[in-house]
Image: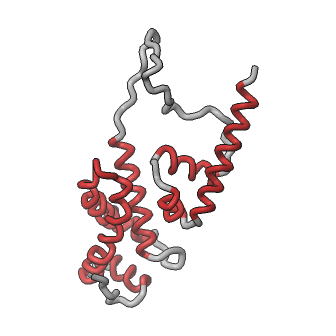
Amino acid sequence: MILENPFKTNQKLHRALLRGNQKAWHYLINHYTPLMLSIISPILGKEYCHESADIVQETFAQLCDNNFNLLTNYEPNKASLGTWLVIICKCRCIDWLRKKRPPTIPLDENMTLTADEETTSTEPLDYPKSLLSDREKTVMTLYFDFELTVKEIASYLSIKEQTVRSLRHKAISKLRDYFRTNSRG
């Protein structure tokens, strides 16, 4: 069910929210909760999908914290209210997932890996930070660390899917070249 904005514009709705208008808050929560749930549920996956509603609720609570500090920073001329809320909610979701990530356990120096054991590393790669552009770093982090799909990354960054693929490809090529060059010797 699509609710009609009783305040007609995001700017008027924003001002009403800052005044604590109950009708504005009711509209905001009822209108944007389904959108936010649909975005973060796939990010959380089946294992944590039951946490979606709590994360959305915490996002709305965050808007009220510190005398509406976060809500005060919303700029209607830069993004729609829905886009802004989804970004905040996704960030909260990613933070929540980071906290849930199991702690790493250091390997004993005497331990050796057998051929059957997994040999992938979760350590950050050591390369010059200027090697990749900020956009390439962002795409690589979202793709490999947070395991977002190309479509999700494109939506999150408001860019085309092909741009995400291109940035990922360029970053991988740069890393391959760097490590090929610097591993000889």
Residue 122 in the figure: left or right of residue 161:
left
Please, which residue is most extreme toward the front here?
116
Please, which residue is most extreme toward the top here?
110
What color scheme is it? secondary structure
Residue 28 in the figure: left or right of residue 74:
left
Residue 44, x across and y down, in percent: 34, 52
* Numbered marks: total: 0
Residue drawn at (35%, 70%) of the image:
35
Residue 117, x across and y down, in percent: 43, 23
Residue drawn at (33%, 59%) of the image:
41
Residue 21 in the figure: left or right of residue 109:
left
Residue 150, x across and y down, in percent: 52, 57
Residue drawn at (35%, 89%) of the image:
7
Question: In the figure, 84 relative to 50: above or below?
Answer: below
To which quarter of the image does residue 104 belong? top left
Residue 135 in the figure: left or right of residue 26:
right
Specify the quadrant that holds the N terminus.
bottom left
Question: In the figure, 161 relative to 98: above or below?
Answer: below
Residue drawn at (57%, 48%) of the image:
140
Residue sitting nearer the eye, 15 or 141: 141
Specify the quadrant that holds the C terminus.
top right
Question: In the figure, 78 relative to 180: above or below?
Answer: below
Residue sitting nearer the eye, 141 or 88: 141
Question: In the figure, 39 relative to 44: above or below?
Answer: below
Residue 70, x across and y down, in percent: 40, 65
